[in-house]
């Protein structure tokens, strides 16, 4: 395939709401790098923060990413078109997705085999909302032939849900999912597939609660209309839930999530609150003997292998949760407006 000199890209240029369509050089490929022709790219919560340029973005973009200007996006799938001289993991023609956290490979955490949570974890130098994306060799992951590019583009957030569910046992037990955005919806499907008895879901978007029901939730609640803790207690003989997944990142919802957790239950925390959380350590944690796990990204490559098995075999389908497919270069503003409205499952951009 002929690789052009220039490419279209959706770029975050200024510290204000929005993004800009630009024409940029196609990146040069270093010895351990892989150039991918982007086919599909999804919108993640962090992309919305960056697009809006909210408090999270102004605190984190300079620190965790390499500042602005920056090509947006990180969840994607595509075809390898060129590899560096030292690359052995993939070859041109391979269909790939990408792990987006890059471990240093040499810190204490990396050395104990937990590199996904590396002390010096880095993100891609640039994003993937472009015709071509440059990624480190170790990030490239081939995906099953049975998956389309758009399905593959959500494997990265799906693998976050896999990481969460892998840290608890839900077989024959009750589950709560607080926040029914894409990771919440994937979590419902996973809990269902893994034999959860009853799944309780809470979200402020009626659209998402409908999707949650389709994914297998037995009870759905809108916290602006009812007292979730009371509803859960009434339906569990006052016991509470065996595992609660907190994915909303809302501090009030997180406090309620702890109150819904039963004695000896497991709290899986994936949501990132933008303000400090206040808990009653006695009743919320200590007397309950609660187990608490924080989920940062994926277990590399374990979560990915589980995702390949579940999606590649068709045991879990994600197509129905990709509620909107749009053209990246002409419809990116529309995509972000949809994603931030809550009236969407996963929004995926298709790239020519
Ligand atoms: Zn993401
Ligand atoms: Zn490290």
Image (spheres, rainbow, N blue to C red):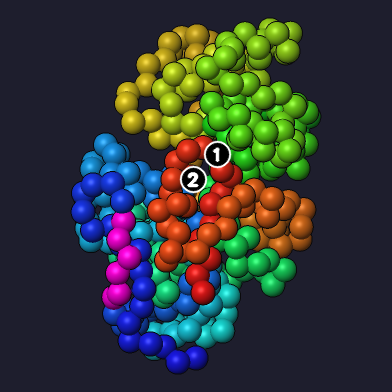
Rounded to the nearest whole Å, what is the CA distance between mark 1 and mark 2? 6 Å
Checking the image for residue 288, the label placed there is none
Along the viewing direction, whichever of 320 and 116 lies nearer the viewer = 320
Percent across and percent down for residue 303 are 58, 53
Tell me, yes or no, whether the highlighted magenta stretch contains residue 192. no
Which is the main secondary structure of the residues drawn in magenta? strand
List the single residue furthest toward the bottom: 2
* Residue 352 appears in the figure: yes
Q: Residue at x 50, y 64 (%)?
A: 327
Q: Which residues are magenta?
A: 19-24
The residue pinned by badge 2 equals 338
Category of crowding for the residue at label 1, using alpha-carbon neighbours closer than 10 angstroms: few (below 14), some (14–19), many (at least 20): some
Which image quarter: residue 59? Answer: top left
> Horizontal and vertical percent for residue 268?
54, 32
Q: Are marks 1 and 2 in contact (CB under 8 Å)?
A: yes
Q: Residues within 10 Å of mark 2 (few under 14, many from 20)?
A: some
Identify the residue under disc 1.
343
Disc 2 element? helix
Q: Nearer the viewer, residue 22 or 58?
A: 22
First along the sequence among labels 1 and 2: 2
Residue 143 location (% of width, % of height): 62, 68
Residue ID at (63%, 21%): 221
In the depicted structure, whether residue 35 falls above or below residue 107: below
Decide if residue 320 is on the left or right side of residue 49: right
20 part of magenta stretch: yes
């Amino acid at each position: 395939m002929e690789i052009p000199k220039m490419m279209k890209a959706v770029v975050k240029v200024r510290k204000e709401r929005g993004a800009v369509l630009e024409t940029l050089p196609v990146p040069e490929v270093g010895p351990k790098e892989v150039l991918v022709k982007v086919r599909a790219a999804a919108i993640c919560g962090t992309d919305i923060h960056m697009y809006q340029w909210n408090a999270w973005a102004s605190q984190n973009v300079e620190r965790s990413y390499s500042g602005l200007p920056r090509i947006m996006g990180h969840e994607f799938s595509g075809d390898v078109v060129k590899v560096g001289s030292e690359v052995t993991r993939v070859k041109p023609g391979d269909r790939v997705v990408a792990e987006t956290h890059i471990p240093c490979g040499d810190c204490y955490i990396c050395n104990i085999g937990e590199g996904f949570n590396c002390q010096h974890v880095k993100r891609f130098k640039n994003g993937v909302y472009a015709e071509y994306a440059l990624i480190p060799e170790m990030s490239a992951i081939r995906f099953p032939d049975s998956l389309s590019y758009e399905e593959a583009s959500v494997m990265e957030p799906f693998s976050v849900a896999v990481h969460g569910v892998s840290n608890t046992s839900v077989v024959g037990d009750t589950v709560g999912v607080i926040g029914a955005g894409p990771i919440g919806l994937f979590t419902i499907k996973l809990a269902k597939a893994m034999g959860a008895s009853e799944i309780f879901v809470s979200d402020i978007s009626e659209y998402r609660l409908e999707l949650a029901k389709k994914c297998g939730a037995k009870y759905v609640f809108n916290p602006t209309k009812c007292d979730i803790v009371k509803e859960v207690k009434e339906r569990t003989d006052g016991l509470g839930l065996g595992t609660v997944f907190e994915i909303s990142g809302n501090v009030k919802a997180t406090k309620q999530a702890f109150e819904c957790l039963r004695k000896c239950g497991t709290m899986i925390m994936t949501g990132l609150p933008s303000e400090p959380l206040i808990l009653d350590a006695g009743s919320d944690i200590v007397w309950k003997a609660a187990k608490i796990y924080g989920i940062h990204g994926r277990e590399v490559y374990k979560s990915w292998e589980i995702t390949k098995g579940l999606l590649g075999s068709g045991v879990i389908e994600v197509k129905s949760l990709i509620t909107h497919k749009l053209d990246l270069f002409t419809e990116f503003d529309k995509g972000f407006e949809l994603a931030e409205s809550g009236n969407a499952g996963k929004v995926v951009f298709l790239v020519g």
